Image (cartoon, rainbow, N blue to C red):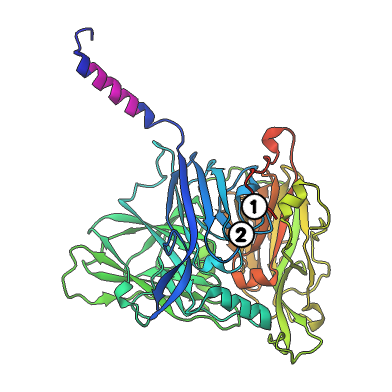
Amino acid sequence: MASLPPILLSFSILICISFLSSFASAELHVREFVIEARPVKRLCRTHQTITVNGQFPGPTLEVRNGDSLAITVVNKARYNISIHWHGIRQLRNPWADGPEFITQCPIRPGQSYTYRFTIEGQEGTLWWHAHSRWLRATVYGALIIYPRLGSPYPFPMPKRDIPILLGEWWDRNPMDVLRQAQFTGAAPNVSDAYTINGQPGDLYRCSRRGTLRFPVFPGETVQLRLINAAMNQELFFAVANHRLTVVEVDSAYTKPFTTNVVMIAPGQTTNVLLTANQRPGRYYIAARAYNSANAPFDNTTTTAILEYVNAPRRTAHVFPRLPGFNDTATVTAFTNRLRSVRREGLPLEIDENLFFTVGLGLINCSNPNSPRCQGPNGTRFAASMNNVSFVLPSRNSLMQAYYQGKRGVFTTDFPPVPPVKFDYTGNVSRGLWQPSRGTKVYKLKYKAKVQIVLQDTSIVTAENHPMHLHGYQFYVVGSGFGNFDPKRDPAKFNLVDPPERNTIGTPPGGWVAMRFIADNPGIWFMHCHIDSHLGWGLAMALLVENGKGELQTVQPPPLDLPRC
Ligand code: C2O
């Protein structure tokens, strides 16, 4: 060693350092998200679309478990905005969660706010989106969390990763679509197209040239990271002639299983492995609606192309077989196959046994002929949980009011069970169709073991409602059709390997049961991820109290938190 020439010595030190730094702890990702209107042309027409950094969809964030992010959102658009990091737990840090008027006031035009947060014990596919009225129609992107360096996937490493963001496009300003619906009280117009990474694909007018092609090498296995960023629609997804192996949902690994079709609801993510083991050719990747409601929907189909690099020049494109739009049986079979690989933090006993109805409603008008009452039979659409139609505060956020001890912004009397018992999925009497309005939260003790059964109602229509809980991952321990039976159904719960998620759909005219430990203090929004339903009030919030000491207490808010 003593005889090593200096140049070689310094070289070996350099190697040592770079070797060590590859194991060094987490990275800090500093980024700027400029919110601005940019011309985007789709379906033959150009719109001034709200984008991030001029990109639609927005930039993909690629980080590792343990990393920190500091993302400065600069609002150069004409709308108030906030950004939500969907699925990130934000432990003790609700200030970075993002839903406007829940954990922060919106970032006004000309202002900025830096979201600072750390990924703690999460890996997989998540995403980010605007959480301010209908801006998420175009303001969204992928958030990919790789495992820590040197920590492998629980399945053979795929050759490549392909993020697939499913979206919904209106041939109008989405904010105008919302404004019109808010005025008339009717359902908002359905979209004009679905998109894959922002592109509608071959089946729409003026879209062929933009159709995305994903090249694959014969024999290789790629990972598709599916994200349903659509505003209002659950989607079926398939790739012609290729089977898909599901390995992860909502940033939680699953026991792998193989399927021809995936159902993915707004807010959810699903990772699938695909092996290019078919005849070299071109295969359509396609998505279209799963519509469980008795309501109009966009019944178009978005496509992209899986293209073998050695595909002969002239081969016909093969189209996948997709289930019928109302094929609930296929959806149930698919969701029932999901199993998690771990059950850390699954409560076997429960302290809080909650039962929430979720569903639509109608508000009666004193003048049913009014232009403001264009819903069914001269009403306005509404939605509720336990008959409370959630009203967003307008002058403060729940979290800021709570932290500063300001009264009058919300109340803590959200009912743990429906105020009136009825046959939820039967023929509900019209007297029960009109919800009350309120800004109510439900209080939970720190570390409470919680069970929530979400019961869909048949008011207006039974429907699959993809319910999302901020700040948590929960276990889906059971589900079924009809009314939940508290005597018989719990006996059938899966407490062995229930899937872990952040968004779960109620079966249409059915119920779903979730469990989690309330170990993240703060105020956390829980809502239907169908934005039209959210706007009608299908939401509530959980207020999780602090525990003891700093590590169980909400952090102080950052200094640049937008003013209310
Ligand atoms: Cu992805 Cu409150 O939403």
Q: Is residue 464 visible?
A: no
Q: Which residues are magenta?
A: 9-19
Query: Of the residues under marks 1 and 2, which one precedes in the sequence?
Result: 2
Q: Residues within 10 Å of mark 2 (few under 14, many from 20)?
A: many
Q: As drawn, which residue projects farthest toward the front? A: 110
Left or right: 428 in relation to 73:
right
x then y, percent, for residue 554: 69, 41
- Three-letter code, disc 1: Pro
Which secondary structure, mark 2?
A: loop
- Three-letter code, disc 2: Arg
In front here: 369 or 240? 369
What quarter of the picture does the C terminus occupy? bottom right
- Considering only vertical position in the picture, is 489 above or below 472? below
In front here: 140 or 127? 140
x then y, percent, for residue 550: 69, 33
Does ligand 1 reach within 8 Å of label 1's beta carbon?
no
Which secondary structure, mark 1?
A: loop
Left or right: 165 in relation to 490:
left
In front here: 348 or 71? 71
Asked if marks 1 and 2 touch (Cβ < 8 Å), the reply is yes
What quarter of the picture does the N terminus occupy? top left
Residue picked out by circle 1 = 562
Q: Quadrant of ligand 1?
A: bottom right
Does ligand 1 reach within 8 Å of label 2's beta carbon?
no
Q: Residues within 10 Å of mark 1 (few under 14, many from 20)?
A: some
Residue picked out by circle 2 = 108
